């Protein structure tokens, strides 16, 4: 699996370079294999069966048996990333993995195309667990249900939670319609557009976490900045903050607002609203309507 672009630790490289050939011929420590398997599960978001774990274990042991230096390097280097993820909070780990997963899948495909049978196996396990709705272009990833679900859930999160507009949650019928529309439209999109869609699950997790981290006062300011419906409590919190604002505190709130706005505008454009008369979402700009037939782009 060619994931060395993730792993750049000098200490590991030195350890590998100075290891003896006899040491390399031995099987790796059991904990090395266990951590590597867990990292593969995290990166691809697949929980392996005992049979799959045994197959991956045999693959790793084979690297050492045949002295496959490139693959050994990858396994050993990956341990640093595993430690960082294992030490992170569950929220940070989930966010990080969701954001880097499209790049991991592109890397697996590339290595598989170059003859990497183990990368091909890992990629096939991902496809088996996530049946594609549509194939992606070369250099991109297939469209899966979680990408479409994330787009719909993101829309509902912004409209319902952030803007407090009381928009209805996506129904099962709406999701089925979105899957069909996405499967039809996805193949004609550019690689860049497809990768934007693949990044949607990571953005949804990140935005939900940012919203929680903003705290009640920060949420009130975000809602006001984005033109949402302010509650009485929102108005009171904003008034209180403006009365007792400090330079540092105010700058922090404004920074949160700017970051949140930038992310949401990239995905949703500006002016996305629920048109109760027409019974539909409407938006200006953004990428949601590229693959969600439930949103209508208006002038």
Image (spheres, grey):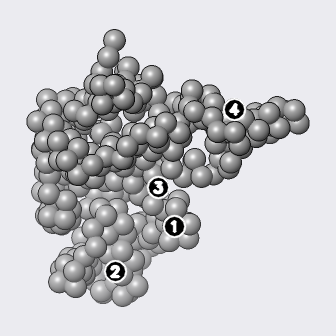
Near-viewer residue (216 or 23): 216
In the picture provided, is 43 more to the left or to the right than 109?
A: right
Q: Nearer the viewer, mark 2 or mark 3?
A: 3
Q: In the rendered image, which quarter contains the C terminus? A: top left
In the picture provided, is 245 more to the left or to the right than 253?
A: right
Q: How far apart in space, not on screen, are marks 1 and 4 (Cα)?
A: 27 Å
User: Which of the numbered marks, if any, corresponds to residue 254?
Assistant: 4
Q: Mark 2 or mark 4, which has the lower sequence index? A: 2
Counting from the top left corner in percent of width and height, residue 267 is at 39, 32
Q: Nearer the viewer, mark 1 or mark 2?
A: 1
Name the secondary structure under disc 3: helix
Near-viewer residue (120 or 202): 202
Q: Can residue 65 be seen from the camera position used here?
A: no
User: Which of the numbered marks, if any, corresponds to residue 33?
Assistant: 2
Q: How far apart in space, not on screen, are marks 3 and 1 (Cα)?
A: 9 Å
Name the secondary structure under disc 2: helix
Counting every numbered tag in the picture gives: 4
Q: Are there few (<14), some (14-19), or many (20+) residues within 10 Å of tag 1?
A: few
Are the two marked residues, 3 and 1, in contact with CB atoms closer than 8 angstroms? no
Counting from the top left corner in percent of width and height, residue 127 is at 16, 59
Q: Are there few (<14), some (14-19), or many (20+) residues within 10 Å of tag 4?
A: some
Instruction: Tell me which residue sits at (45%, 52%) in the image.
Output: 205
Q: Is 63 drawn above or below residue 73 in the view shown?
A: below
Q: Nearer the viewer, mark 2 or mark 4?
A: 4
């Amino acid at each position: 699996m060619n994931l060395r672009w993730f792993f750049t630790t000098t200490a590991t490289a030195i350890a590998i370079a100075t290891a003896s050939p006899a040491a390399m011929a031995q099987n790796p420590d059991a904990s090395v294999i266990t951590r590597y398997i867990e990292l593969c599960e995290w990166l691809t978001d697949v929980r392996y069966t005992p049979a799959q774990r045994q197959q991956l274990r045999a693959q790793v042991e084979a690297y050492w048996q045949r002295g496959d230096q490139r693959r050994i390097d990858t396994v050993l280097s990956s341990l640093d990333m595993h430690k960082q993820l294992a030490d992170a909070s569950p929220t940070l780990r989930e966010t990080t993995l969701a954001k880097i997963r499209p790049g991991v899948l592109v890397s697996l495909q590339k290595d598989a195309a170059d003859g990497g049978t183990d990368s091909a196996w890992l990629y096939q396990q991902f496809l088996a667990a996530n049946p594609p709705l549509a194939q992606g272009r070369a250099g991109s990833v297939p469209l899966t249900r979680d990408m479409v679900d994330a787009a719909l859930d993101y829309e509902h999160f912004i409209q319902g939670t952030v803007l407090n507009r009381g928009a209805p949650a996506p129904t099962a019928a709406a999701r089925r319609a979105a899957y069909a529309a996405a499967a039809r439209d996805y193949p004609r999109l550019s690689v860049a557009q497809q990768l934007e869609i693949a990044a949607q699950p990571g953005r949804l997790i990140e935005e939900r976490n940012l919203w929680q981290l903003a705290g009640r006062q920060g949420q009130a300011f975000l809602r006001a900045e984005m033109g949402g419906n302010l509650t009485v409590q929102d108005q009171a919190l904003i008034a209180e903050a403006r009365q007792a604002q400090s330079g540092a505190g105010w700058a922090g709130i404004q920074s949160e607002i700017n970051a949140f706005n930038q992310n949401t505008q990239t995905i949703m454009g500006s002016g996305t609203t629920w048109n109760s008369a027409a019974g539909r979402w409407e938006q200006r700009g953004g990428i949601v309507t590229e693959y969600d037939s439930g949103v209508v782009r208006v002038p």
